[in-house]
Image (spheres, grey):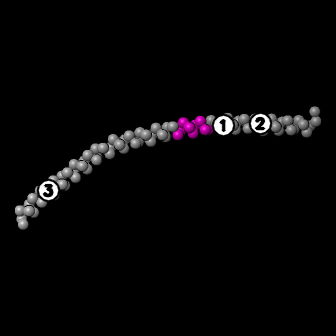
Amino acid sequence: MNPTQVVIIISISAITICLIVLTIWVVSLLSNLKNTIIKTNLILDNAKLITDDISAPISQVKDFFVGVREGITLIQSFFNKNDK
């Protein structure tokens, strides 16, 4: 075999090995990225559940104070009618 052929065969073999290693690395990276996205999605779902659980009592407290304000307004309207 000619020395040029040997160099070409070695070069092509080295490039092929590098491409195989790079492909394996990219597949591994994409697999890790998929797992990270799945975990992030679970975290966001839990955050939504937590905020829903927190917002329900806050909404009830708000409704309570709206009722108190309307009651005070009603009582004030009775006293204002008597003053006229």
What x and y, as percent, mark residue 14? 79, 37
Q: Main secondary structure of the magenta part?
A: helix
Q: Is residue 42 left or right of residue 76?
A: right
Mark drawn on residue 76: none
Question: Is label 2 in a helix, a strand or a loop?
Answer: helix
* Amino acid of disc 1: Trp
Pointer 2 residue = 16
Q: Is residue 9 left or right of residue 55?
A: right
State the residue at coordinates (49%, 37%): 39
Name of the residue lying farthest toward the bottom? 84
Question: Is label 3 in a helix, a strand or a loop?
Answer: helix
**Where's the N terminus, which quadrant?**
top right
Question: Is label 1 in a helix, a strand or a loop?
Answer: helix
Task: Looking at the picture, tell me which residue is in the foreground, 64 or 22.
Answer: 64
Disc 1 crowd, CA 10 A, few/some/many (<14, 14-19, 20+): few
Task: Looking at the picture, tell me which residue is in the foreground, 53 or 14.
Answer: 53
Magenta region includes residue 33: yes
What x and y, as percent, mark residue 10? 84, 36
Pointer 1 residue = 25
Inter-mark Cα distance, 2 to 1: 14 Å
- Of tags 3 and 1, the one toward the viewer is 3
What x and y, as percent, mark residue 35? 54, 36
Could you say which quadrant of the image residue 6 lies in? top right
Range drawn in magenta: 29-37
* Amino acid of disc 2: Thr
State the residue at coordinates (5%, 62%): 82
Task: Looking at the picture, tell me which residue is in the foreground, 74 or 72.
Answer: 74
Inter-mark Cα distance, 3 to 1: 72 Å
- Seen in the picture, residue 79 relative to 37 is either above or below; the reply is below
Disc 3 crowd, CA 10 A, few/some/many (<14, 14-19, 20+): few
